[in-house]
Amino acid sequence: MGMIPARFDYRQAGSVAEALQLLVSCDDAKLLAGGHSLVPLMKMRLVSPATLIDISGIAELQGVADTGSVLRVGALTRHRVVERSQVVAQHVPLLAHVAGLVGDPQVRNRGTIGGSLVHGDPAADLPSVALATGATMIVTGPAGERRITAADFFVDFLETAVGPDEILTAIEFPKRTGAGFGYEKFVRRSMDYAIVGVAVQAGEQPGIALVNMGSVPRRAEAASQALASGAAVDAVAALAADGTNPPEDLNANADYRRHLASVLTKRALLAAGYR
Amino acid sequence: MSLIGAKVLRKEDPNLITGQGLYVDDLQPAGCAFMATVRSTQPHARIVAVDTSAARSIDGVLAAWTATDIANLPARPSSLPGMDMPLITGDVARFVGDIVAVVVAADRSTAADAAEAVIVDYEPLPAVASLGQALATDAPMIHPVLQGNTVFFQDYTEDLSAEFAAAPRTASLSLVNNRCAPVPIEPNVVLADWGPAGLTVWAAFQAPHHLRNTIAAFFGISQDTTRVIAPDVGGGFGAKINFASEIFLAAALSRALSRPVKYTQTRSECMVAMFHGRAQEHKVDVAFDDSGKILALKVQVTQDQGAYPDATGMGLPVLTTAMSAGCYKIPKVAVSWRNVVTNTTPVAAYRGAGRPEASYMIERVIDLVADETGVDPIEVRKTNFIPADGFPYQTHSPLAVYDSGNFAGALDELLRHVDYPALKAEQAARMADPTEKLLGIGFSSWLEIAGFGPPGSLEAFGHLASWESAQVRVQPDGSAIIYTGASPHGQGTVTTFAQIAADQLGIDFDRISVRHGDTAVIPQGIGTMGSRAVAVGGEGVKTASTRVFERAKKIAAHLLEATEDDIVVENEEFHVRGTPSKSVPWSQVAWKSFQPLELPAGMEPGSLDATVFQQVPNFSFPSGAYCCVVEIDRETGEVEIRNMYLVDDCGTVINPMLVEGQVHGGVAQGIAQALYEHMQYDESGVPRTATLMDYLVPAAPDLPGYVSGRTVTLNPSNTLGAKGVGESGSVGAPPAVINAVVDALSHLGVKHIDMPATPQKIWSILRGSK
């Protein structure tokens, strides 16, 4: 019971091309980046891939680049690096702020932004940032690169648009320099996954996205539209849970989650500078 | 200068904080094999078949045992006749976690693979997952020997209907004391090595001699060739007094395989296999007058024992009902209890074991009386306290004769730290402003029974005796080694016992070592539990040290040609009082104590060695007064502890730093029970909180800073005056927290909230009030 994974083969990829090639040649392979989503699942034997392809050493997938209108964050960039990046703090401050709220320092020193997004966990923090800021995922496969908007990226519970032979290589965040932002994360115990979380990105094309309000990370569409059309904070917050089908667990039933979504949306809007 | 009361740094820490401690799992003898378990996934099921053939065929697998392979072994010790917990269950699985098979392999991963390859065919049986289900008419039964699921029932000890009928006021309260998992950082770990010369068992355990004697009896072997070693132990909280089945299985497998067998529980196993704590329901009736004076109390405790009643677990409601009157002089108390089996993990000792349940109950009752009468909770407490000159105090229970205390004094000391009028004013102002968080102020004047114990007290739980052993041996260079039967697992005993010995011997603290945990080296001992190490074991160290010192004085007097009564010791030098120049160092006295030619007539060599089996005439009764201030978010229902004020009375403090550490840890566990932790099962008996993602052990940022005060009433049962402090925080904190939460919500008509007070529960109340 628990803690000891089944046997697996271990391969290291030195480049994206090599990782893609290994994905094709190895049966039942999984990519290993920071391992903070995958390894616990393996230890509980909820997943038992035959092969792990370790991509954590691929240099081209690391770091933050300012390309002018967007910040391009390599998929293997660790949360700690994002959290501490001056460039991120200046141009996508919501991202830097939320990266600093993922798990605890040990998790942030190992976990990667790409790993978190591609896991597609509705309770994770970073998908909401991608959704609220309108990020674009860069995915590389045998046929080359394709770009997927955050809105199209999260497909189902723990499932994203990344194909089995593809790798998420980078995330492009439109610059939000000087715009307000807010992130509210409700937990019973510090450093846990959010029971409910709300990310608000102010400025042009404002966005509100929800954490743990359904089986898939999602934008609060009605609230985001109301915000864009200039509705008052209370009115926007009242729409936060519209169209959601929140999960029920020991911490919160669906009613409570809907309520929390509204409360937290209001708080995040206030933090983002809306009145 | 006395070291009693000195903030001495822990001798244990250099090893432990640099990662150089030695835990059982660190041991890796040559040829060591690994055991893994196959546990029932069913709460209650007939086991139709267990197929180990696939597991056996895996390369490196050495054994795969089912119940038939251990048919010649007894059931788990400490079981109750007819309700025995099998080491491996054969016919029926009775809780999720019941062992169905074990496998042994050459390495840990292969063992895990083999365990996964064992196929168990279950035929589910109807299960009882709660006390309500277990006691329902026609409830499914777990043990055929019982009529229903009640193991034991004690009706009310007295009929108080006349008192209740005559009382000006009465009130009732139903409470749930939530089931908790102990979650020590180190789970159960065992390494058994059965060779031609005997059996050695390294185990994460709190009472190694108790285990050694039990293992020897279990296998029918001699105690002299059976050795148990508890090296560094990473927390126990009472759960490591229990005879985990895995210990006996590892030993049996080592015998069969002729190689060392190690078993390290995974966290997932630990959550369901390590015995749980608390798990009580209370029905309380109280009779009182308009002034808040309590006239009579009726307490009915229903104890969930889990699937297999354990001897220690059976005693929990005995302790709860013994301590039901708390700090209060209540003229009439009647208690009743019932032990009930359910298809859940067995329940036994967990930090406080029966006493936190009592203090929670009576302190909630006090606040209920305050609420009903409109008298301030402080006043209700003061009205009912046993007065400071009222000791010894015979309670309603023959078990509990309170030895000493000053409950009003502790509460007054608490109120020196707490600005109660200002808090009340702030509370009113916040209540009036809907944008503000609600404020709640909760008190607990608590008392527990500790220092186990007087003759007969631990025997009742299956122990050999209730004393504790101490041996003091001065080495030829004048350093000293203390051997204690106490078996620390985080208490700092190595430090406190060296402080006690240093004081008596006049030997430097740095030249005193304290050894424990190895039955081959330590005189027969009892162990560390029930806040007894210092109060009993520490007293033993003092007694033995005093005996050794008296003999050393004789030798020094002989060497100095002086009379014994004139000899004093200072800076490790014996000298004649008033004549410091006439002196002999401790090292010389020690050296010569081994040389017959140097000794006074009639003195044997090696006399600076004394062994004591320290008895105490009574339990000890640590007490205190706590205050918790909470803020409640009106929108989310979240409770935040703003302040926690703690006044402890543990008698003499040996080391204030260690006392503070014990109190902080205990309070953290108490807060955890009040706000976070709850081991839950679904209606069918499947655990819902079997991982640390769902079972919320709070983290450091979730806990407040503490303000600590102290009062001291001495323990009259030992010369140290120390009462013990290991369980205090877990006894005192839960009622303070819940009283504060209820106080914050009482304007909404709230009389009680069961633990843990989760945000969703409170939000539901707040929403309902709108």
Image (cartoon, rainbow, N blue to C red):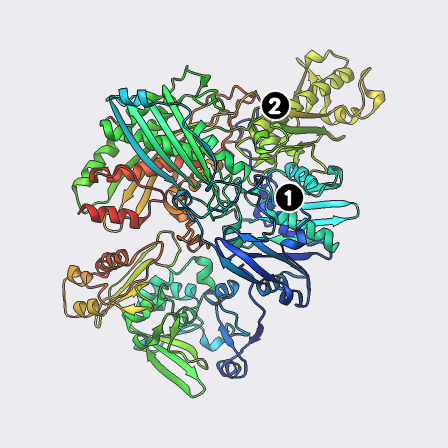
Residue B734, above or below B767: above
Quadrant assignment, res A153: bottom left
Quadrant assignment, res B489: top right
**Residue at coordinates 31% horizontally, 45% vertically from top-left?**
B639
Name which residue type carries label 2: Gln
Label ID, residue A275 = none
- Work out whether mark 2 precedes mark 1 in sequence or the reverse, and give the earlier one: 1
Q: Which residue is mark 2?
A: B615
Quadrant assignment, res B217: top right
The local secondary structure at tag 1 comes to loop
Residue at the right extreme? B597
Task: Give the quadrant of the N terminus of chain B.
Answer: top right
Name which residue type carries label 1: Pro
Q: Which residue is mark 1?
A: B231
Q: Chain of mark 2?
A: B
Q: Is residue B715 left or right of residue A119?
A: right
Q: Is residue B530 left or right of residue A247?
A: right
